[in-house]
Image (cartoon, rainbow, N blue to C red):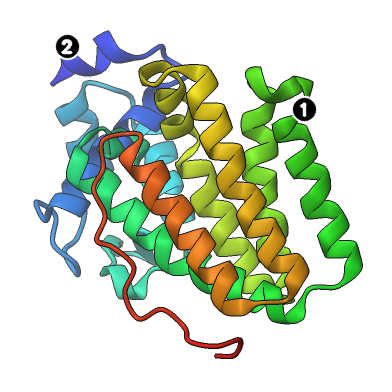
Amino acid sequence: MKQRLAAIGTVEALPHRVAAFLSREIESGDLNPGSLLPTEQQLSEKFGVSRNVVREAIAQLRADGMVEARQGIGSFVLAPEQRAAIRIDRETLKEGQNMERLFELRCILEAESAALAAERREQEHLDAIKAALDRMSGEERWEDGSIDADLLFHREIARATGNSYIHTFISFVCEQIRRSIYYARQTNPLHDLVEVNVGEHVRIYEALVAGDPAAAEAAMRAHIIGAANRVGVKLPSARGERTGGGK
């Protein structure tokens, strides 16, 4: 264990590495909800690091909402439903099943977000969404900046719902899939990828302009399914689509 920690990070990175290791043990169930974390001394010996490193790592776990400190006792593992913070370990997204789960979550959140945005958007929202779309389809489309514009497009749709919680959740999920966009660009012909991706976004935007919730939801769902396919993730086809123009 000591060799592993020494090999994967600098001294400055050690608290993060210890926290990441412990968080994986929590997520895998090796450390069960309600269980008491080992003492600082025990963790220090286990990982071959100082107690200050351990203390910083546990503070990070508390900030991530994974453990709860109890005065005079120690830190206890929290169950997922008890956590006050959302956290996704990006290392786990290298596993296909976890990436599929993330895209499934994204499809649920963003399809509904698009439908709500179509109902509630104001002109200022459409202007912001169009500005992001223009960046994606303009000179910048072949560069990394278009990835920022892509994610901004989705965040602005979430903002157009008028629900700050939806915007917060979708902004979080957007950052988790940034790496998948880079991967898609590396594994697909760039010209074809950009043209297809921009076309999908145009259809979403047109549905928002038309104020058509059903079309916006369908267009967003088709885009997420397509984006998943481009990184080798297969999602189920659309289910429970809206009929007509309302909810």
- Quick one: which residue is furthest to the left in this view? 30
Q: Position of residue 155 (x, y in %)?
A: 66, 54
Number of numbered labels in the structure image:
2
Above or below 139: residue 19: below
Task: State the SS at label 1.
Answer: loop
**Residue 247 left/right relative to 211:** left
Residue 76 position within the rendered picture, expressed as x and y whole percent measured from the top left: 27, 63
Residue drawn 53% across the image and 43% down it: 175
Q: Which residue is mark 1?
A: 138
76 vs 211: above or below: above
Disc 1 crowd rating (10 Å Cα; few below 14, some 14-19, many 20+) is few
Quadrant of the image containing the N terminus = top left
Mark 2 secondary-structure assignment: helix
Query: As shown in the figure, which amino acid type bears the numbered disc 1?
Result: Gly
Residue at image location 57% in from the left, 71% down from the top:
215
One can see residue 192 in this view: yes
